[in-house]
Image: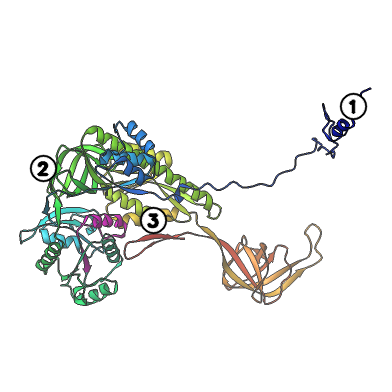
Amino acid sequence: CFHVSPDLLARRRHDESFGLKAPKKQKRVKRENRTQPPVEAPYIPPKPIKSAKSLPDKTIDIFEGMTIVELAKRTGAAISILQDILVNVGEKVDSEFDPISIDIAELVAMEVGVNVRRLHSNEGAVLQPRPAVITVMGHVDHGKTSLLDALRQTSVAAKEAGGITQHLGAFVVKMPSGASITFLDTPGHAAFSAMRARGAAVTDIVVLVVAADDGVMPQTLEAMSHAKGANVPIVVAINKCDKPAADPERVRVQLGSEGLMLEEMGGDIQVVEVSAMSKIGLDKLEEALLLQAEMMDLKARVDGTAQAYVVEARLDRGRGPLATAIVKAGTLVCGQHVVVGAEWGRIRAIRDMLGMMAETAGPAMPVEIEGLRGLPMAGDDIVVVDSEERARMLSAGRKKKLEKDRLTKIDERRIETSETSEEMPERVEMPIIVKADVQGTVQAVTDALKSLNSPQVFVNIVHVGVGPLSQSDVDLAQACGAYIVGFNIRNPPSSVTMAANRANIKICFHRVIYHLLEDMGNLIVDKAPGIFETQVAGEAQVLNIFELKGRSKSKGEDVKIAGCRVIDGRFTKSSTLRLVRSGEVVFEGSCTSLKREKQDVEAVGKGNECGLMIEDCDDFQVGDIIQCLEQVNRKPKFVSSESGAVRIEC
C-alpha cells in the first residue's frame, strides 16, 4: 500500500501520465489496393521556350580609351566577368578604371554576345578640305553610266554586258574647273538594291538621274528612299533632254508629288537638265555639284589611322582577294595590318582606279587593296590594328560571332518551319550554287534568287563564291543535287565541264541579270509540283432515259442509261461525272459505261449523242445536266515587272 496525501493525488490526476503514452484512437484510413492501375494525371504542356528571335540584338557604341566600368554598364555584364575575359584574351589590366584599346573592347563585347559600333573622335586632329563623294543613282537604263562617261570622257557602258551596269564602280573625275570629285556608279536593276544602299551609306551627295522621256520609275523611288535614309542631299539630273519625247516639266511634277522639294517649288534641291549623248548641260551639273559640296564644307582628318569602307570585293587569279574601298578619314598606308569584317591581312599593295601603285590613300580616295587572307563582304569596315597578333585575334573573334549568329538564325528558321509545317503544303527543295565575279554581284544574285521562293518550291542557296567554277563546286553539286549558276565568270576548264556532264549537273552561265532570273524562274516553274484542281471538261444534257429490266443475275440488277447530247467540251470514260439539276449537284460518281451508236468508246466530242451510266446512280430526269470532271495540275507562273522585279505566282 502507498500512502499518499490527497493533494498529491489530485495533482496527479490533472498532470500527464509518466512513462509511455497509449496511442490515441484515430480514424482508420483504408489503404489503396496497390494492384489497381494508377490514375492518369492530366497532361500539362511545358512552357514554350522563348526562341532567340524574341531577344533583340543589342548594339553598343565603343571608343578608344574606354574603361572596363563603362564597358560593363553598356554591355550589362558584371565587371568580374569582363575581367576574366580580359585575362583569357591576354590583356593585363590592374584596375577597372584603366583605359583599354578599342580592339580589346570589341573582343570583350563579342565574347559577352553583343554587337558593337566603333566611334572615332576627331578631337585635337587637324581637319582639311577633302573632295566630295558623289553617288549616281536612278532607274535602270536612264543613262547614269553614260552621264559619267560624258564627264570623264570614257565608255564604260559599252563594256558592260547587255548595256546595263551590274557592278559598283568607283573613280575620281577631274572637272574642267580643276576640282576633283569621287563618283560611285550604282546599278539600276531591281536585283541590286543592296549595292545602291551601300552607295548611299558612304556618299556625301546623291545625283538622282531621271530620264526625261520615261519619268519617275520604281528604282527612282527606291533611290530617293535610300538617300533619305542616309540623310544625304540630292541633286536631280534630268537626262535625255534632247529626245523628241522629252518632257522635263512632267518629271518635275512627279518628283514634287513624291515629296522632293525642288528649287522651283521653294525647296533646296537643285534640278539640272542634261543630255549625256549630246553633252548638253554638263557644265551646269558640275556647278551644282560643286556648290552643294561647298555648302556642306566637307573636311576630314588626314593624320592618324585610317577609317575606310569596302564597296566591292573580288577574287583575282594572280593577286588573290582584292577589296575596293573608299577612305573616310585618316591615311591608309601600305604595309599596315588591317581587319576587314571577319578577314585580316597586311596591305601588300594599294592601287588607284587607274591601276597605278600608291604608297598611301587619303580621304575620299577610292583604292584597291591587295594582301588580305580571305575575301571580305561588301559593306565591311576596314580597321587598322597595331600588330599581326591583334589582327588575328580580332578576326578570330568576329568569325566566332558570325558563326554563332548563323547557327542562331538556323535554329530560328527551324522553329518557324516546325510551327508552319502543318499549315503549308508540301514544298520541293531546289538547291543552288552561286558563283560570280565580285562579292557584290554574288549578294545581288543570291538575294534575287531567294525572292523566287514560293509555297511550292524552296530555293536553298547551299554555297556562294567568287571566282571561276572549280571541281570542288561540281563535287558539292553532285553530293546535294544542286544547280550551278555562274554570273559574269569565264568558262570553266574542259575537265570541269566534262565532270559536270557525267554527273548530269545543270550549269547556267549568264552575263545579264535579266536572262539569269528568267532562266532560273522557268526552272523553278518546271520543278514545282503544282496544285491539282478539278475542272469541268465537258457538259451534256439528258434527252431521254432508257431502262434495262429483267437482266439475269450474272449481268446484275436493273439499270438506267442516260441518253445525252454533249453541248460543250468532251466526255471521257475514265473521268468522274457530276449530275446537276436546277443548278444543284444531285450526285457525283465515276462513269461505268460510255457508248455511242451501240459501241463502247473512250471519248465523245461536242455535238455528238451518247449513252452513259454513272456508278450507283439511277436518278436521271430529262433536262438534267451531266458534267465531265477532270483533274488538272496547275503550275505556278514566273512574273517579271517592267522595273526588273521578279516573283513566282502560285
Q: Is residue 340 left or right of residue 401?
A: left
Sequence order check, earlier mark of 2 and 3? 2
| Mark 2 in CB contact with mark 3 (< 8 angstroms) | no
Expressed as whole percent of the image width and height from the top left, the position of residue 445 reads 32, 52
**Quick one: SS at disc 3?**
loop
Expressed as whole percent of the image width and height from the top left, the position of residue 617 reads 72, 66
Q: Which residue does the numbered mark 1 point to in the structure image? A: 4
How far apart marks 1 and 3 lie (CA) works out to 108 Å
Sequence order check, earlier mark of 2 and 1? 1
Q: Amino acid at mark 3?
A: Ser
Where is 387 relative to 465, above or below? above
Write the start and end of the magenta stretch as one range: 185-210
**Quick one: SS at disc 2?**
strand
- The picture quadrant where one finds residue 555 is bottom right
Q: Which residue does the numbered mark 2 point to in the structure image? A: 357
How far apart marks 2 and 1 lie (CA) works out to 126 Å
Q: Identify the disc placed on residue 451.
A: 3
